Amino acid sequence: MKNAFWTTLSLLLVILVWYLAADRITPFTSNARVKAVLTPITPQVSGTVVEIRARNGQIVEAGEVLAVIDQRSYEIRVDEARADLARAMQDVGAGSADVESAQAKLSRAKADLETEKLQASRVFDLEAKGLVAIAKGDEARRRLSEAEAEVERATADLESIRTSLGSTGQDNPRIQKALAELADAELKLSWTTLTAPARGALSDLDLAAGSYARAGQDLLTFLDASNVWVEAYMTENNLGNIKIGDRVDVVLDRHPGRIIEGRVSSYSAAASDGTTSKPGQPAAIPRASGWLRSPQRFPVRIVLPDYMTAVETDDVRFSLNGQADVIVYTGDNTLLNTIGRAYIRVVSWFSYAY
């Protein structure tokens, strides 16, 4: 009886020592989840959904069409914008003709002024010699003044037309405005086609042709399959020896009995404590109740080098937030690493049952 007591006590001490050492050297957690980027597909224009081209869970490539919103009203707006552009170009062309006409008018006015100056000069010479009547000189001065005024009017008309017309060609403000409106119409037309932002799949597809899509409101849920990882939630005791690059064994509940090798990619320096603090105020401290406090957990990101992207032909399938068991090997401790590998193997077998 006495031997059994000491044997049991020794066994308990060995288990306790192993637990304390393993918690630091080969930390294990069953609190881990499969993660990927979840992106809401939000239309930027409103309209009736006329076509759904992707199935729920189907892997699609970046740029592949997921759904189409009724394009007819947006196509009409593009046609109107093109017509406005053509009209603006015609108006600028007509304005250019007006400039040419005003320029010709100014040239004629200047030529007439030179003629009047020449004739007036002769009359003024004769007037000075007393060879013509004073009335003749007054008439020459009147005609010269009118010619000068005509040049001023023609110059003002030309400047007014040029100001109204603006620059010629593509730099003309009217054409620039029409081009901008056309670009806006074409952009909105392109927004009627909803495409995959990356390689991935639609999740929880609850949409059918005939549904109404509103601009700015989420319409589809997209899972980015180009970046998949496992997030393990470790206690602060577990984090003591974990380093980026440490080897990890992962068991996914979706694939019981199988161990997948991974690596520590990063770990968070902060975690939510369930309280909030406003800027400029002291940090809010969570209350601890009872003698033993609950351990704070921090997310550790683990990548699976052979399965960093979800591929339909892969022998491993992922489900967002699917559960996983994780053990990290933080060093070269042969004994603890061997025990850890045996332990995660047993866990993988138990995952068949729960």
Image (cartoon, rainbow, N blue to C red):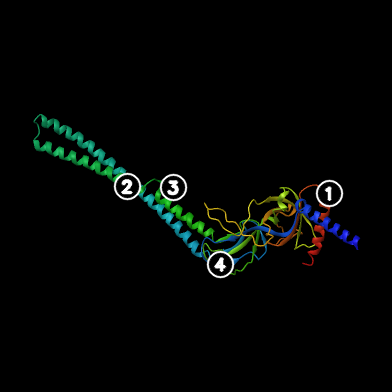
* Whole-percent x, y for residue 40 in the image: 59, 61
> Which amino acid is tagged 2?
Ile
Residue annotated with mark 3: 170
Of mark 3 and mark 2, the one earlier in the sequence is 2
> Which amino acid is tagged 3?
Gln
- The residue at the far top in this view is 129
Tell me what residue is drawn at x 80 percent, y 59 percent.
258
Of mark 2 and mark 1, the one earlier in the sequence is 2
Q: On residue 161, which mark appears?
A: 2
* Helix, strand or loop under label 4: strand
Of mark 1 and mark 4, the one earlier in the sequence is 4
Which numbered disc, 1 or 4, marks the residue closer to the eye?
Answer: 1
Q: Quadrant of the C terminus?
A: bottom right
Residue annotated with mark 1: 334
* Whole-percent x, y for residue 351 in the image: 78, 64
Is residue 223 visible to us here? yes
Tell me what residue is drawn at x 81 percent, y 58 percent.
343
> Which amino acid is tagged 1?
Thr
Q: Is residue 70 left or right of residue 6?
A: left
Which numbered disc, 2 or 1, marks the residue closer to the eye?
Answer: 1
Q: On residue 49, which mark appears?
A: 4
Q: Is residue 215 above or below residue 161?
A: below
Of mark 1 and mark 3, the one earlier in the sequence is 3
Q: CA distance from mark 2 to mark 1?
A: 91 Å
* Whole-percent x, y for residue 188 in the image: 51, 59
* Helix, strand or loop under label 2: helix
